[in-house]
Image (cartoon, rainbow, N blue to C red):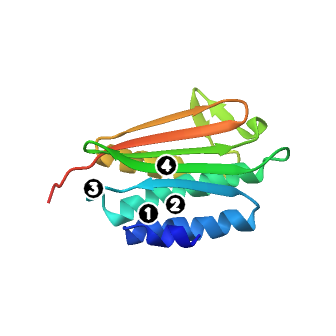
Amino acid sequence: TTALLSIDHSVIASILYVKKILANKNAIILETEIDLQEEIYIEDIDLTILLGNILDNAVEACEHVTIGEKRIKLMIKFVDNIFLIHCQNTMNSEKINLKDEQLMTTKGDSINHGIGLRNIQYVVDKYNGEKNISFTKDIFSIKIRLINEDNR
């Protein structure tokens, strides 16, 4: 956990620190691979929305895993001017709710839930990025690519 504090971006470091504590509390292994070589032009609030929602969803998915280990792998890096986030987590495939190829919330109160992915999509659109979601029987994967440009 102390390694997260050495990340050279206070917002990302603090989100990961808090989510690592949450994961530990839920017996979830959270692995991170963070490579921030370039200046990040994505606003702090948008980074918070992205990472917060991605990791909250991953922790929640892991909580439904009853057999085997609970694991989240998060990678954040740059490729040219693209800011990349890739998160994979174990999941219980019985807890996936698909409707017309769209992921739907599995919570009873769908009015107040399911906004996590909508918030993620809002940020992706704001930075002309793309979101790719895929899953196998027991692994959920989300990849986010955002254009990292100085638009000040």
Residue wearing tag 2: 52
Q: Residue at x 52, y 68 (%)?
A: 3
Q: CA distance from mark 1 to mark 4?
A: 15 Å
Residue linked to disc 4: 75
Judging depth in this view, the residue of 35 and 117 nearest the camera is 35
Q: Are marks 4 and 2 in contact (CB under 8 Å)?
A: no
- Residue found farthest to the top: 100
Q: CA distance from mark 4 to mark 3?
A: 15 Å
Asked whether, in this view, residue 116 is left or right of residue 108, the answer is left
Alpha-carbon distance for marks 2 and 1? 5 Å
Which callout, 1 or 4, points at the residue further toward the start of the chain?
1
Is residue 14 visible in this depiction of the protein? Answer: no
Q: Which residue is mark 1?
A: 48
N-terminal of the pair, mark 4 or mark 3, is: 3
Residue 17 at what x, y percent from top left?
Answer: 55, 70
Give the CA separation, mark 2 to mark 3: 21 Å
Find numbered disc 1 in the image and state the secondary structure of the residue it sits on: helix
How far is the residue under mark 3 from the one under mark 1?
18 Å
In x, y percent, where is residue 150? Answer: 17, 55
Q: Amino acid at mark 2?
A: Gly
Amino acid tagged 3? Glu
Position in image of residue 19 (x %, y %):
59, 65
Residue 8 lies in quadrant: bottom left
Q: Which residue is mark 3?
A: 38
The answer to whether marks 1 and 4 mark residues whose Cβ atoms lie closer than 8 Å is no
Tag 4: residue type? Met
Residue at 37% x, 45% y: name it.
Answer: 124
